């Protein structure tokens, strides 16, 4: 028997992440090896998971990668762990389309045959909580809701009333509760929180959550309920483990530090499996593009949080600029795209000079500029996604790009989202840059194209 459990919610803001982190931390204290997963494309919650478990958390997204790939990503990620904890996204049935469950937490639960624990915010209600749970049970299509956790209970007495009602009316156990307590509410999630996680500043908060979960939630019951049958999984992305042992033909330099670190683990693993050696460098630490690199990947993050430091790294900026001008096959996503523009302008109007490869500037905003899934269609000259090829990904950013007046800005993609299709990004030579975070599992041919372009670049340099 395997152990896996989905932590689903009745909606956003009910406390899924707080409870997920708390359960992970409490189980870790018992010396249980926990593997974290996140439904959907979000990068921030997996950063919390990784900080608590010490293992890279992975995204499970049936819309971006397809159903078989979800199983494979799950199987690969959960190896050598005692239990997999899968944090849901939004409400349990919320996905890409209001008419179907595709991409939803429920969809991931069905694909993986995973038991589900439903989180209900019971503030200001008692017996009505049972009606909510019953509604979720009846709305689903065979979803295995095995238990409930109540959040924001006003008192132990309040919790007991809710527990009695749910267990009587819904026939599933209530595993416990968390009290209404501002000290255990997760700080408002935003990109700037991620560096504080990495610096260990939230460690005391994780400890507090672990203690609260241990005191109020039946972890032994949760472990029992998490038992599930093994998954029947086909290899659709990684043909064999031997593939990872193949000789590496090219080196791809990856910017990785507090400013640039939003990478799907599978993107890097697919590059490695395809014959690339991933080497890492830190622009924030003043590290230039490694001289033996044949490709360059500058992922998402939040360069705006470190704009002053990045602006001062003239050597780093010059090395990135000269290598791109030389033709190194480069993908720059979101934060990486912003870094390659002429300047980042913060919300108070301060201007910070960046690499200057993309003619224009990025203006930061206090409100979200874009959020949602994207279907990216390649254009002529795009080495990664040629004309006629498509890939899936998502956008999430607080900035807008303003092209330099009179500049010839050729888009890297045609990007289709909920509001229609628009040109996205910038293409010149072997540079592909844009706001969309691409998931290589949605079109593994991107890996072949990139490695092929890297080999050509390598030969041209000899």
Image: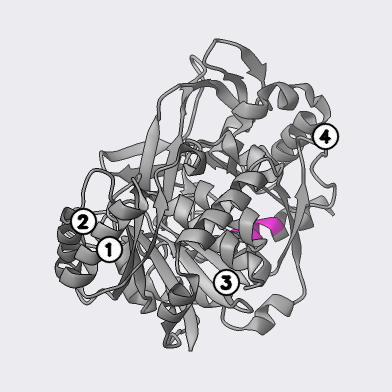
The residue where tag 1 is placed is 163
Nearer mark to the viewer, of 4 and 3:
3
- Disc 4: CA contacts within 10 A as few (<14), some (14-19) or many (>=20): some
Which residue is found at the position 48% from the left and 41% from the top? 412
Q: Where is residue 186? Give x, y as percent.
A: 49, 42
Q: Residue at x 78, y 58 (%)?
A: 459
- The residue that label 3 is drawn on is 77
Q: CA distance from mark 4 to mark 3?
A: 32 Å
| Residue matched to label 2 | 129
The residue to which callout 4 is attached is 286
Residue at image x 61%, y 76%?
A: 81
Circle nearer the N terminus (1, 2): 2
Residue 116 x/y as whole percent: 35, 70
Closer to us: 435 or 329: 435
Disc with the residue nearer the chain's start (3 vs 1): 3
Colour pattern: one colour
Callout 3 crowding tier (Cα within 10 Å): few <14, some 14–19, many ≥20: many
């Amino acid at each position: 028997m395997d152990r896996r459990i989905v932590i689903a919610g009745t909606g956003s803001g009910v406390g899924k992440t707080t409870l997920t982190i708390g359960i992970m931390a409490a189980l870790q204290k018992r010396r249980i090896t926990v593997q974290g997963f996140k439904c959907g494309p979000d990068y921030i919650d997996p950063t919390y998971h990784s900080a608590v478990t010490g293992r890279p958390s992975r995204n499970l997204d049936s819309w971006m990668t397809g159903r078989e790939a979800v199983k494979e990503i799950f199987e690969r990620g959960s190896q050598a762990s005692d239990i997999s904890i899968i944090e849901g996204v939004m409400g349990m049935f919320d996905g890409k389309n209001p008419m179907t469950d595709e991409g939803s937490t429920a969809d991931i639960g069905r694909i993986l045959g995973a038991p589900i624990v439903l989180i209900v915010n019971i503030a200001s209600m008692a017996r009505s909580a049972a009606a909510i749970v019953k509604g979720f049970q009846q709305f689903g299509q065979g979803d295995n809701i095995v238990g409930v956790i109540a959040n924001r209970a006003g008192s132990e007495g309040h919790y007991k009333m809710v527990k009695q009602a749910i267990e009587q009316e819904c026939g599933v156990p209530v595993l416990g509760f968390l009290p209404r307590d501002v000290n255990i509410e997760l700080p408002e999630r935003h990109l700037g929180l991620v560096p504080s996680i990495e610096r260990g500043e939230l460690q005391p908060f994780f400890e507090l959550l672990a203690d609260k979960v241990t005191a109020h939630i039946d972890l032994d019951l949760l472990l029992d309920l998490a038992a599930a049958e093994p998954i029947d999984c086909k290899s659709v992305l990684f043909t064999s483990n031997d593939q990872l042992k193949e000789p590496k033909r090219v080196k791809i330099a990856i910017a990785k530090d507090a400013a640039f670190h939003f990478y799907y683990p599978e993107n890097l693993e697919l590059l490695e499996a395809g014959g690339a050696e991933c080497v890492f460098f830190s622009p924030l630490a003043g590290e230039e593009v490694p001289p033996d690199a044949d490709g360059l990947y500058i992922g998402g993050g939040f360069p705006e949080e470190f704009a002053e430091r990045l602006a001062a790294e003239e050597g780093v900026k010059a090395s990135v600029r000269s290598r791109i001008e030389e033709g190194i096959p480069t993908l720059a996503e979101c934060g990486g795209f912003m870094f390659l523009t002429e300047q980042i302008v913060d919300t108070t109007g301060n201007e910070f000079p960046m690499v200057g490869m993309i003619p224009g500037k990025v203006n930061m905003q206090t409100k979200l500029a874009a959020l949602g899934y994207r279907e990216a269609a390649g254009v002529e000259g795009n080495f990664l996604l040629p004309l006629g090829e498509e890939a899936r990904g998502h956008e999430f950013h607080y900035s807008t790009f303003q092209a330099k007046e009179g500049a010839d800005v050729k888009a890297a993609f045609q990007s289709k989202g909920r509001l229609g299709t628009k040109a996205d990004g910038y293409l010149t030579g072997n540079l592909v840059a844009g706001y969309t975070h691409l998931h290589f599992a949605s079109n593994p041919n991107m890996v072949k194209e990139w490695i092929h372009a890297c080999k050509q670049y390598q030969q041209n340099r000899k």
